[in-house]
Amino acid sequence: MADIPSHHLIYGTLIDFVTGDEIVDTDDERIRQGLARFLVENKNYDRGDLEVRRRIETLFAKQYVVSTIDIVIREGDRRFLVIRYGPGSLVTRERPAIAAARVLEESYQIPLAVVTNGKDAELIDTRSGKVIDQGLDSIPAKEDAAALVRQLRFLPIENEKRKDAELRILNAYDVEVCCAGDTCPLPGAREG
């Protein structure tokens, strides 16, 4: 087993389906790997269309938080969809996924987000914040992506005040609280 202190059960390491990198093997990571495999094998994306473990770092009120965007899907030179995984209820995952999609790119807001627990999913229009479809099958397939990207609007974030508000939302939602009741002391751990 990996020698990393953690609040997750660690089985050792595994090879990332998309990148080929060796990463920490946890129950959550196995679900993320299954999602990546689903996108390639069922939705026909190339591994090169997927970016995994994108990070957004925030610091507010002395609270440093790293928000991880599990998968970003790209069509051509446009990142058009973010996927965030989390166990349990999807509703509680919607707002931070929208915030991540709005600030991940410097020049435009990513127009679609998916929140999933690995069994169910919601497709969200990040401009309106509304759920527009449900289920893992709601994730657009590769063959539909080019036409979809031509229809989507890739708007810049309105202003720095709005960007700051979205970053604050990520910071508040994604803070890791360990079972000891304090923030997670694992900034260097390579787990999802």
Image (cartoon, rainbow, N blue to C red):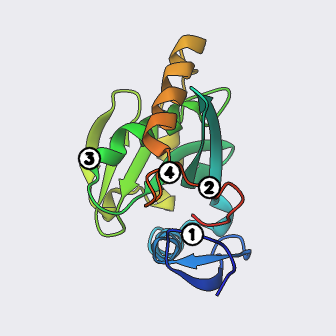
How many angstroms separate mark 1 from mark 2 (CA)? 9 Å
Residue 167 as seen in the image, left or right of residue 140: right
Instruction: For the N terminus, give its image quadrant.
Output: bottom right
Image position of 114 with respect to 108: above or below: below
Q: Amino acid at mark 4?
A: Glu
| Displayed quadrant of residue 71 | bottom right
Q: Between disc 2 and disc 3, whose residue precedes? A: 3
Q: Secondary structure at mark 4?
A: loop
Percent position (x, y) of residue 55? 64, 47
Q: Between disc 1 and disc 2, whose residue precedes? A: 1
Which disc is residue 49 wearing?
none
Q: Secondary structure at mark 1?
A: loop
Please name the residue that numbered disc 2 is placed on.
185
Q: Secondary structure at mark 2?
A: loop
Q: How many marks?
A: 4
Which disc is residue 91 wearing?
3
